[in-house]
């Protein structure tokens, strides 16, 4: 009896592994989805938001529903800022290595 119980526990434990790994990978997925009834901010508003953080925004692209803002910081270093256009949260902020 214990062999059946152990086999079932191992089977169900291993079968849930892809779900756990998928959730971990999804948390690193920088996709921005629109909540129902919420409109995205305009590109102009996104640029102004980036400028309010002290960046000079030179380019805005859309990827996976997010705005990717490129530009420079106050010291002239290149930056990339990923912004959720639905809630205004910064998803990712990085200085580009030169």
Image: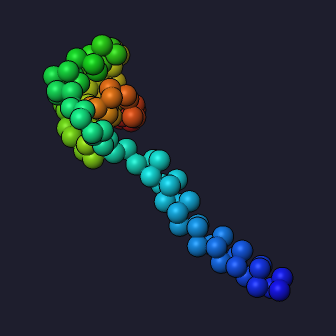
Q: Which residue lies furthest to the right in this view?
A: 2
Judging depth in this view, the residue of 78 and 15 nearest the camera is 15
Residue 62, by quadrant, is: top left
- Name which residue lies at 40% across and 34% down: 92
Q: Where is residue 21 in the image (x, y as percent from the top left)?
A: 54, 60
- Identify the image quadrant of residue 4: bottom right
Looking at the image, what colour scheme do you see? rainbow
Residue 97 can be seen in this image: yes
Decide which of 2, 14 is in the foreground and name it: 2
Q: Residue at x 45, y 47 (%)?
A: 28
Q: In which quarter of the image is residue 72?
A: top left
Residue 16, horizontal then vertical, whole percent: 58, 67
In the depicted structure, whether residue 27 falls above or below residue 79 = below
- Residue 90: x, y in percent? 38, 29
36 lies left or right of 9: left
Q: Residue at x 16, y 22 (%)?
A: 44
Q: How many labels does the image show?
A: 0
Visible in this render: residue 80?
no
Q: Position of residue 31 (x, y in %)?
A: 33, 45
Quadrant in which the C terminus appears = top left
Q: Height in image: 47 above or below 93?
A: above
As drawn, is 53 to the left or to the right of 27? left
* Quadrant, the N terminus: bottom right
Instruction: Give the camera-side residue of 12 and 23.
Output: 12
């Amino acid at each position: 009896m214990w062999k059946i119980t152990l086999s079932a526990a191992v089977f169900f434990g291993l079968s849930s592994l892809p779900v756990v790994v998928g959730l971990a990978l999804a948390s690193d997925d920088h996709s921005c989805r629109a909540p129902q009834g919420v409109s995205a901010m305009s590109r102009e508003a996104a640029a102004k938001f980036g400028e309010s953080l002290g960046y000079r925004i030179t380019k805005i692209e859309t990827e996976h529903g997010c705005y990717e803002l490129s530009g420079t910081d106050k010291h002239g270093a290149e930056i990339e800022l990923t912004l959720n256009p639905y809630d205004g949260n910064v998803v990712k902020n990085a200085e580009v290595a030169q």
